Amino acid sequence: MRAIEKFGTLAMTAALSVVLAGSVLLGQPAFAGQDAGASKQPYTMAEYNAYTAAAAEKNPAAQIKLLDDFVSKYPNSALLIYVYPLYYQNYGVQKNYPRAIEYADKTTALGDKLDANAKFFALYAHAAMYSALISDPANKAAGQDAVLAKAAQDAAAGALKALPDFKKPEGVSDDVFNTQKTAWLLTLDAVAAQAAMVQKDYPDAITYYKADLALKPDDPIVEYSLGRAELASTPPQTLDGLWIIARAAGSKSATAQQSNSLKTYLRKLVANYQQAACDNLTDAELNELLQLSATAQDRPDSYKLPSAADLDAARKDMTIASVIADLKAGGDKGKVTWLASCGLEFPDVPGKIIEVTPGTDLTEIKVAFVTTEAEFDAATTPNMDVKIVGQPDAARLEKDNSVRFTATLASYDPDPAFMLHWEKGKVNVEDIPKEKGKKPVRKPAAKSSN
């Protein structure tokens, strides 16, 4: 799953770069309508000239020097609302993300001096730079820093709160503006969710991932991430987590490699959750989950997946008689019974031999399960097929004799031709005739616990 996680991080980082560039273009600070020489201006001509010189500088290192000079000369300048954004944009271009975050926060700290757009951009820049920081292989430790994550989540949350007050710039069409806002929302939700995951704040992570999916359904990376958050919650939201990861595996937006990786991961999750003994049943559960999840974003209450605890409870008082009865009845109970019983070894299962196919290494017998003499006398149709291995003497078994065998339950055929299939069988030696034609005791015990 590391490949999927890495793809998600890189994809989001690329989106952040594009959106951040777009945000700067959409909201570049300007002095429209202002007269730098007017006496009412809250800054001097010297301040203004120093700022414009820094803003015009294209060399990042040279610009930082000019900005440092400006701040040292005018530490309380009204133009800091424009100077600090230049800092975080410059440091962002240089991939010095910690310094970019520092100046984004300095911008935010200016408070009421900022207009709604400048406030949003500063908060957004912090979130964007955090995502870029933890995506950089050189900063692996930052990705596990809960303090950095908390600050980034707060910034993203603040930007989401500030966005409704953002003023559409003149000359920008509604369609372009709405598209940009959606991109911002997707990015901020993703960053907030990612930061919440670092803090193990799974409820918030779930909220933000769901908000992202509401804007952009069928996103396999977000669906996978949401599933991880649900599985990690206390208590785990296991069925919801499995459901959304199944949707990610079946997403039309997923690559073949992503889909295969997700299905492999999902199968492991299902196998661990149920701990069924038969692998083919895990495959069946996986296929059912993939088919059902393709029809709905959210898991319906009707979807259930028996857990290992459910299977253990079913095994507690299980007998072959109860297994047969439950399987014939079908429904949810029949499903749980089969998941719990398949792959188990049952000792001394009693029955009446209906047919024998003898062999040296393998003898196959078809048996009617019986527990009383009356059932034995009436039995004419088998409902169990038993493969006996490593017991050559079993070839002497004969039709209409009673038999007790120990074997592993492997599969079954449902009604109307109900049949339990057993593997790795061994017959009780007392039930094998000493010689061909000499039969052991015919009738079974009065009652069996099997």
Image (spheres, grey):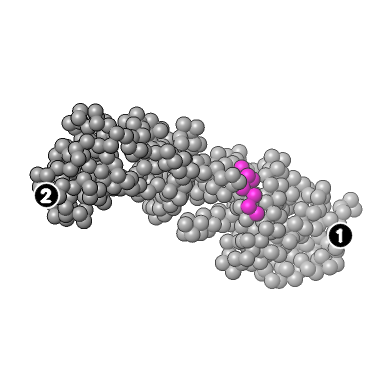
**Residue drawn where x is 26% and y is 45% of the image:** 405
Principal SS element in the magenta part? helix
Question: Is 204 one of the magenta-colored residues?
Answer: yes
Residue 247 image position (x, y, % from top left): 45, 43
Q: Say left or right for 346 vs 174.
A: left
Quadrant housing residue 133: bottom right
Label 2 residue SS: loop
Quadrant housing residue 339: top left
Q: Say left or right for 236 vs 437.
A: right
Q: Which residue reaches farthest left? A: 437
Residue that carries the numbered disc 1 in the rendered image? 76
Residue 273 image position (x, y, % from top left): 47, 47
Residue 418 image position (x, y, % from top left): 25, 33
Residue range in magenta is 199-207
**Residue drawn where x is 19% and y is 38% of the image:** 442
Quarter of the picture holding the C terminus:
top left
Residue 399 image position (x, y, % from top left): 14, 39
Which labelled disc corresponds to residue 435? 2
User: Does any portion of residue 45 appear in the rendered image?
Assistant: no
Circles 2, 1 touching at the beta carbon (< 8 Å): no
Q: What kind of residue is marked 1? A: Asn
User: Dot 1 surroundings within 10 Å: few (below 14), some, or many (20 or more)?
Assistant: few
Q: Which residue reaches farthest right? A: 39
Q: Say left or right for 220 vs 403.
A: right
Return the disc, 2 or 1, that comes first in the chain's sequence: 1
Query: Is 407 drawn above or below residue 137 in the view shown?
Result: above
Label 1 residue SS: loop
